[in-house]
Amino acid sequence: MNRKKLAAAAVSSAIVAAAAWAVQALADHAASPLAGVTGGADQQLIERGRYLAQVGDCVACHTAKGGKPFAGGLGIASPIGTIYSSNITPDEKTGIGGYTLQAFDRAVRHGIAKDGSTLYPAMPYASYAKVEPSDVKALYAYFMNGVQPVSQANRATDIPWPLSMRWPLRFWRMIFAPAAVADGAPPPEGSAARGRYLVAGLGHCGECHTPRGVGLQMKTLSDADPLYLSGGVVDGYLAKSLRGDVKDGLGAWSEADIAAFLKSGRTGHAAAFGGMKDVVEDSTQHMSDADLTSIARYLKTLSPIRGPEGALRPDETVALELRAGTGAGNGALTYVDNCAACHRTSGAGYGGTFPKLGLNSVVNSDDPGSLITLVLKGGEMPWTKAAPTHYGMPGFADRLTDRDIADVLTFVRSSWGNRAPAVTAERVAKLRKALGAAPPPNRPENG
Ligand code: HEC
Ligand code: HEC
Ligand code: HEC
């Protein structure tokens, strides 16, 4: 479809969706499943809400750097300007203290603010639409009774007029956001079903891990579609595929590996970095072991995208060459000088401390965005209760040229049994610029 046709289709589907939505909205009101909850909720419900707020990671977006929890004001970049998160503390004037359960639900699951305007999809309501009403009730009880009210006015977006007008967002919502799940739907039964519910709904994993389409919507919300959780890009990092592919998905990860990664931010062979570091710190480390196992079990049900493919096999050639000093080429030399102290000439790293680079699912992803960003900026493992010592990797932006970074990553991606496409210096230069990383050292001989 070309752009014009796409736009026409979007408008006509918007009209159909609008009609369907109006009918649904009326039905929702008639049978309001959320009726009857007020501010004074019981302690158990509040505690369940506190837990669910961690699963939903509300704090990550609704707390400014150095700001009070849930008071909002965190800037979230969008292609048209910066959007600021709202104050969701129960302050009457500046927060959501005056929200009824219905108003809260309309914001969280339907993307509609109290004044009837549509929220920017930076608030992940397209995912939260999958949250069951009983869980929304618990969240509401927590926000009304378990959160300290903070008086802090909301900040308007930096988006210039006319793009700042909110009414077009309504069309986005009607086309791309699914209807919120109804009350009385049978609760997910069995561990994998519980995992599926958490991943699609409160966990909003697809907001990062599913690729986005022309309207910046998640390309699919259905796990019957192989694009689901097949990888998206966030802040230069690849929120990689969580599907069953052995090479670059979770095919080679056990259920226990996945659960350990989400709980402690690391496994014997990998560590969380980029946006996933914050997800682990703020959200998944607080989940119960049962819920983490459910998520892991569910992720292991996602089929590989590429069909049967040979698993990667360890290959010692490069390690032997490096040890013998015969590994030549700028990539190998750059690796020995800058990376091998931690990741070792064998690429095996040190379990739980420095990740293993051989046969690693991040290293073997087709898109090298994460690797380039990590080498430019460095990283720090998440801090978690389960693994309180966090190790870091320095950034190399000011020490390595674009050529060096491309060569060392191409080397890493083709050594020890790894099999991923080469990295170009152009791609490194582009990301260096986009991320505002330090300029390269002045060594013209390496380009
Ligand atoms: C990925 C970031 C992100 C996460 C996670 C997130 N929010 Fe939001 N939320 C936002 C942004 C941004 C806005 C403001 C959108 C706008 O101004 O259009 C918002 C708006 C809201 C509003 C509307 C407030 C108003 O003024 O009407 C509510 C309520 C809300 N969020 C609750 C929650 C809850 C509860 C959670 C956790 C279950 C949550 N949010 C998680 C980004 C997020
Ligand atoms: C804010 C964006 C974001 C959200 C939300 C998010 N992730 Fe991630 N995730 C990433 C990024 C970026 C990476 C790549 C860096 C890394 O491997 O740590 C990643 C990596 C991972 C990995 C490691 C895979 C591998 O092969 O190394 C797992 C497992 C994972 N995420 C699971 C989840 C689950 C489950 C959820 C939902 C509960 C989730 N993620 C939500 C951004 C996100
Ligand atoms: C001081 C030790 C150290 C050095 C030197 C170092 N790294 Fe790392 N590396 C780490 C640590 C620690 C992590 C985990 C970072 C995180 O979680 O944010 C990591 C993570 C990685 C990862 C992600 C692996 C995964 O699955 O989590 C890659 C790829 C990587 N390093 C490549 C390199 C390359 C290439 C170099 C040289 C240019 C290098 N590292 C230099 C310590 C180091």
Image: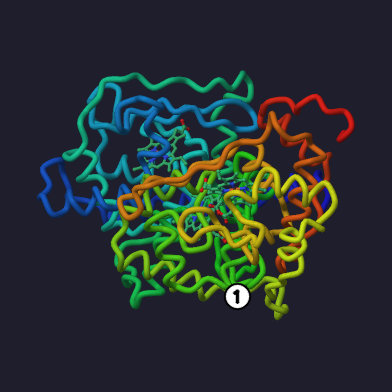
Q: Position of residue 81 (x, y in %)?
A: 60, 26
**Quadrant assignment for the N terminus:** bottom right
Rendered position, 134 above or below 119: below
Say whether residue 109 is left or right of residue 237.
left
Residue 156 can be seen in this image: yes
Amino acid type of the residue that numbered disc 1 sits on in the rendered structure: Ser
Q: Which residue is mark 1?
A: 303
Q: Position of residue 164 (x, y in %)?
A: 58, 24
**Quadrant assignment for the C terminus:** top right
Say whether residue 318 is left or right of residue 436.
right
How has the structure been colored for display? rainbow
Rendered position, 192 above or below 108: below
Q: Nearer the viewer, residue 344 or 184?
A: 344
Q: Residue at x 68, y 50 (%)?
A: 213
Rendered position, 229 above or below 78: below
Q: Residue at x 73, y 29 (%)?
A: 433
Picture quadrant of residue 362: bottom right
Q: Residue at x 38, y 70 (%)?
A: 294
Q: Position of residue 135 (x, y in %)?
A: 28, 56
Q: Position of residue 337 (x, y in %)?
A: 70, 44
